[in-house]
Image (tube, rainbow, N blue to C red):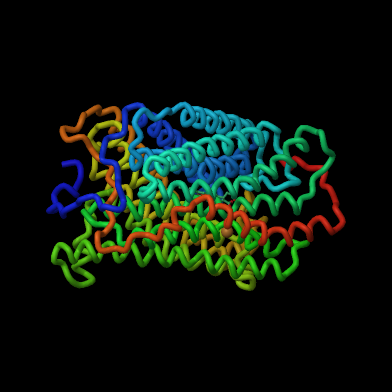
Amino acid sequence: MARAELERPALPREPSDTIPIAVEAATPAENRLVLWHVYTATAALTLGALFGLLQGFSRAGYLAMPAYFDYYRMLTAHGVLMALVFTTFFITGICTYATYRSIDRPGRSLVLAWGSFWLMLAGTVMAAVTILAGNASVLYTFYAPLKASPYFYFGATLLILGTWGVAIDIVANVVWFKRRHPAERIPLPAYMCATTFIMWVIATLGVVAEMGILIPWSLGFTSGVDVELTRMLFWYFGHPLVYFWIMGAYIIWYTVVPATFGGRIFSDALTRLSFLMLLLFSTPVGIHHQFVDPGISAGWKWLHMLLTYGVVIPSFMTAFAIFATFELAARRAGVRGFWNTIRFLPWRDPVFAGAACAMLLFIPGGFGGLVNASYSMDVLVHNTMWVVGHFHITVGGPVALTFVAAAYALVPALTGRKLFAPNVALAQVWLWFGGMTLMSLSMHWAGLLGAPRRTAEVSYLGSTVAQEWHPQMVAAALGGTLLFISILMFVYVAVGTRLQNQVAVVPPQFRFAPVDERAMPPPVVFDRLGVWAMIAIALALLAYAGPLVEQFSQPHFLAPGMRTW
Ligand code: HEM
Ligand SMILES: [Cu+2]
């Protein structure tokens, strides 16, 4: 049996009245499109994991990268492939799928969707080749005055423009639905995808503006750049990037995870409200990445710190709603009590187990984030391995593991094939959980001892201080090895599912859970996405107008750019 879920007594699942979720299977052409996104994401994850493993060993002092493929080139490739390529392709894939599945639109054209995919892929290949060839060792934050080859900036811009195509496609489907069904609410999965991508477009305006400065400079048309301005534009985009990942994971937590145990979504209104809050609060907080940057006055830093605490609220709402979903389903099945509820959940289903492990990792991840966001405490951890530990236990843990877990349901549904080696899949998610826990906790600890991030030379010429964090870095390398093995197991299952070519007797389904029928219908105003988008833009402008005016009123020193490698 492919899915442990099938062994449980199925609870009644009827689609809710207010939230129509199309039950028709997506067309083979739509499935193929989504598969391409998932495969590209998997390829990026696999190559990124290899570099991650080598980095772990380098940082533990067991490996020195050769001059023809140095540490920073590898670190750039790892950061870009993992944080920008793997995550983005998975989210564009799952959101396209969720939108198409929840909006039943006959004869849908896939021209825009395919065009966007090829644009994203072309951009990715261009940037990746430039990095691997050694012409863009600028790390995934590409801070000026480090100057990459123009192909890197062009590639990254194409990747982003491609995602705008995906955004237009998703929003166009939602608009089509609203025109056809003015009295109905936007189906919940499509609603979540639309808010995610509206937020994404608002956020990426910043990085596209930054590219407008970096591209002419890298081509030699301008003699220098304002470093501080480019950093501000980067982090205007960089923080909502994090929420783009998190919203992608939340879509799965809210709508797919309950379906693994026949549960129902706790509240449609709460789900929409948390996504609206993420849309509004993800952007006006980016300066919390610039607490130690000069040229931004303390007042703005303080405001962005406060707003960052605001964006924690939808995460607490999500935690509450997910636990409520577990409890509701357990009670419906006559199960009572905390431990019985835990036992009731389908732990042998890799889709559920992976997502649940991801949620567990997000608890320390979220609290660590509060430390980073605090103006005063951040100084202790800034640019140390703590930060690397933090983003591995957030994006590398909760987000990436949720995507991997969802792929165990998605790939069979898209290919019509049985999941290959489900036990390997189950072991894989637990190994990821163990490896990530070990690696990131060790990184946090090393950071507290003072280990800096982003350094190729780790012994500091044999300094005794650097020896203090060596044991933690060895533990991190061990955790990284477990993670690497886990990713290989994922690839084994994913490729096996495809190659084994065992067509499932009952076509595997990727299910979205219905909403609990006792939940209140969401207020109509939640569906006015155009208005919410305007408010989000206004908030972003309010939070950034002051810092930008401050930038322009100071004397400008333009940096000519350098190539340190
Ligand atoms: C096999 C699994 C992985 C291992 C062993 C690993 C290891 C590492 C190590 C050791 C570093 C720190 C390098 C330094 O500061 O010098 C690093 C950086 C990083 N990792 Fe991972 N990682 C893994 C998976 C992931 C995943 C799944 C993601 C995100 C989806 C990710 C995103 C990043 C990012 C964004 C950086 C920062 C790069 C920079 O500082 O420019 N990693 N990784
Ligand atoms: Cu941030």
Q: Nearer the viewer, residue 198 or 407?
A: 198
Q: Nearer the viewer, residue 30 or 378?
A: 30
* Above or below for 11 versus 306: above
Res 62 visible: no
Question: What residue lies at 33% left-to-right and 60% top-to-bottom?
Answer: 521
Instruction: Give how far across and how far down residue 75 sits, in percent.
Output: 58, 44
How many numbered badges does the structure rendering display?
A: 0
- In-image side of 462 versus 192 (left or right): right
Q: Quick one: quadrant of the N terminus?
A: top left
* Above or below for 288 versus 477: below
Q: Quadrant of residue 162?
A: top right
Question: What residue lies at 23% left-to-right and 64% top-to-bottom?
Answer: 328
Q: Quick one: quadrant of the C terminus?
A: top right
Instruction: Give how far across and how far down residue 263 sits, in percent.
Output: 23, 56
Instruction: Give how far across and how far down residue 443 sits, in percent.
Output: 51, 60
The residue furthest right is 555
Q: Nearer the viewer, residue 227 or 232?
A: 232
- In-image side of 134 versus 144 (left or right): left
* Above or below for 351 versus 116: below
Question: What residue lies at 42% left-to-right and 50% top-to-bottom?
Answer: 192
Res 552 visible: yes
Split into quadrants, the picture shows ligand 2 in the one at bottom right
- In-image side of 390 versus 453 (left or right): left
Instruction: Give how far across and how far down residue 212 sits, in percent.
Output: 72, 40
Question: What residue lies at 56% left-to-right and 28% top-to-bottom?
Answer: 122
